[in-house]
Image (tube, rainbow, N blue to C red):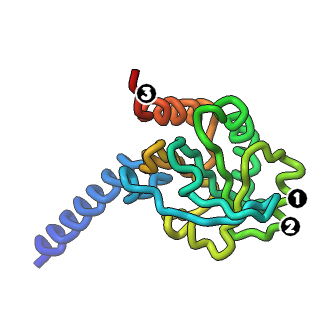
Amino acid sequence: MNWRVTLSFVVLCLGLLGVLAKGFGSNPREVPFMLKGQAAPPFTLRALDSGMRVTSEQLKGRPMVINFWASWCGPCRMEHRVLEWGAREFGAQAQFLGVVFEDTEDNAKQFLSEMGASFPQLIDQNSGVAVAYGVAGVPETYFIDSNGIILGKHVGPIDPETLAKWIQTLVASAPTAKQ
């Protein structure tokens, strides 16, 4: 009977080691992303500054960098300067958009008055667009090519090098003009 207990214990330990080995071999911040290579969900949102409606259809034909953020999000505060820089540096190559996630308009406006707002900021009133894109938390940044296909996303605050690499990817995916 003792050998059965020992054998059960050994099997249990081997199973646990297998689970741990698999877990240590992956990035715990990586979230499965099912929309990669898919058409970006369409949206109609309201601009924070003007109240005007902005649709994904209006922006079609140009690569987009869409950042979901909130004023209460500490990492969003850290990355906002990077996005401001990116919009200035790469704004001719891609349309940058901020989407306010589960926040009030007043708080978002206060945040932007402190941090800057060089690219359009949109209100996702009921988080419908965030749900459609699969946002798990903020900040998250989505990279959409000129054909409206999601090439990927970055979870967490983005750094300048990563943003620049994504812009290169967006530019490289753009169709070349016919001569």
Question: Could you tell which of marks 1 and 3 lies nearer the N-terminus?
Answer: 1
Q: Which mark is residue 177?
A: 3
**Label 3: which secondary element:** loop
**Label 2: which secondary element:** helix
User: What residue is drawn where x is 37% and y is 59%?
Assistant: 34
Marks 1 and 3, how far apart at CA: 42 Å
User: What residue is drawn where x is 45% and y is 52%?
Assistant: 30
User: What residue is drawn where x is 47% and y is 62%?
Assistant: 41
Marks 1 and 2, how far apart at CA: 6 Å
Could you say where residue 128 lies in the image, as x and y percent from the top left? Answer: 57, 72
Q: Which mark is residue 106?
A: 2
For this rendering, which residue is in front, 71 or 30? 71
Residue at image mark 1:
110
Could you say where residue 58 lies in the image, as x and y percent from the top left? Answer: 59, 54
Question: Could you tell which of marks 2 and 3 lies nearer the N-terminus?
Answer: 2
The label nearer to you, 1 versus 3, is: 3
Q: Amino acid at mark 1?
A: Gln
**Disc 2 packing (10 Å; few <14; some 14–19; many ≥20):** few
Please determine whether, in this image, residue 103 is positioned above or below residue 112: below
As drawn, is 20 to the left or to the right of 146?
A: left
Asked whether the beta carbons under mark 1 and mark 3 sit within 8 Å of each other, the answer is no
As drawn, is 35 to the left or to the right of 67?
A: left
**Most distant residue in the bottom direction:** 1
For this rendering, which residue is in front, 10 or 117? 117
Q: Quadrant of the C terminus?
A: top left
Asked whether the beta carbons under mark 1 and mark 2 sit within 8 Å of each other, the answer is yes
For this rendering, which residue is in front, 46 or 17? 46
